[in-house]
Image (tube, helix red, strand yellow):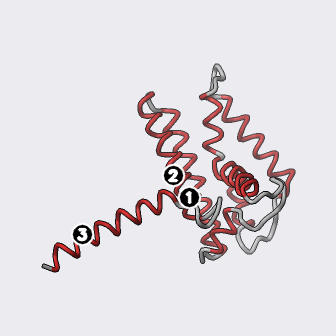
Amino acid sequence: MDLLGFLFYNFHPAKIFLGDSGALMIGFIIGFLSLLGFKNITFIALFFPIVILAVPFIDTLFAMIRRMKKGQHIMQADKSHLHHKLLALGYTHRQTVLLIYSIAIMFSLSSVILYLSQPLGALMMFILIVFTIELIVEFTGLIDDNYRPILNLITKKGNGKQHHYDEHHRS
């Protein structure tokens, strides 16, 4: 609960900042607590904390992919992280933060649903999570502004249907 109070003061324009040590400690605590509920740690059990912390994992993973694709060192700083991309899409600082919070909450809830699901439901949830990550990556341009295979496919299908509709109703 203390963290929720902290978020109020850390909202744009921030009055206080957490800092690296605090963020690392909170990440460690979240990881530790997420593993407490598992009696025997299996590969699948390690997946739940990753889904809960999907936003920083996604941002870091695709920053490395983006930099490798451009021939840059993976640790080189850039202005293409999720929050930069959302700002470039026209969202305000407040909207960007709220959107990232919403995505984080969605992944946290997905992790709980995934944990409580039967195997078939877990598989469907896993596919939905991967699809959602792909849409976020494409919409924001986390890899590249031109990387949009699914969005282009949806746009082509949508344009095709509209074209067919127009031809049919002109006659």
The circle on residue 132 is 2
- Place of residue 91 in the rendered image (x, y in percent of width and height, measured from the top left): 60, 75
Mark sitting earlier along the chain (3/2) = 2
* Of the pair 63 and 55, the residue shown nearer to us: 63
- Left or right position of 100 against 165: right
User: Residue under circle 3?
Assistant: 164
Q: Are marks 1 and 2 in contact (CB under 8 Å)?
A: yes
Helix, strand, or loop for circle 3? helix
For the question of whether residue 1 can be seen, the reply is: no
* Of the pair 125 and 8, the residue shown nearer to us: 125
Pointer 1: residues within 10 angstroms few (<14), some, or many (20+)? some
Residue at point 43%, 28% (across, down): 118
The circle on residue 49 is none
Pointer 2: residues within 10 angstroms few (<14), some, or many (20+)? some
The alpha-carbon separation of the residues under discs 1 and 3 comes to 29 Å
For the question of whether residue 22 can be seen, the reply is: yes
Residue at point 66%, 35% (across, down): 34
The alpha-carbon separation of the residues under discs 1 and 2 comes to 6 Å
- Left or right position of 2 against 138: right
Helix, strand, or loop for circle 1? helix
Mark sitting earlier along the chain (1/3) = 1
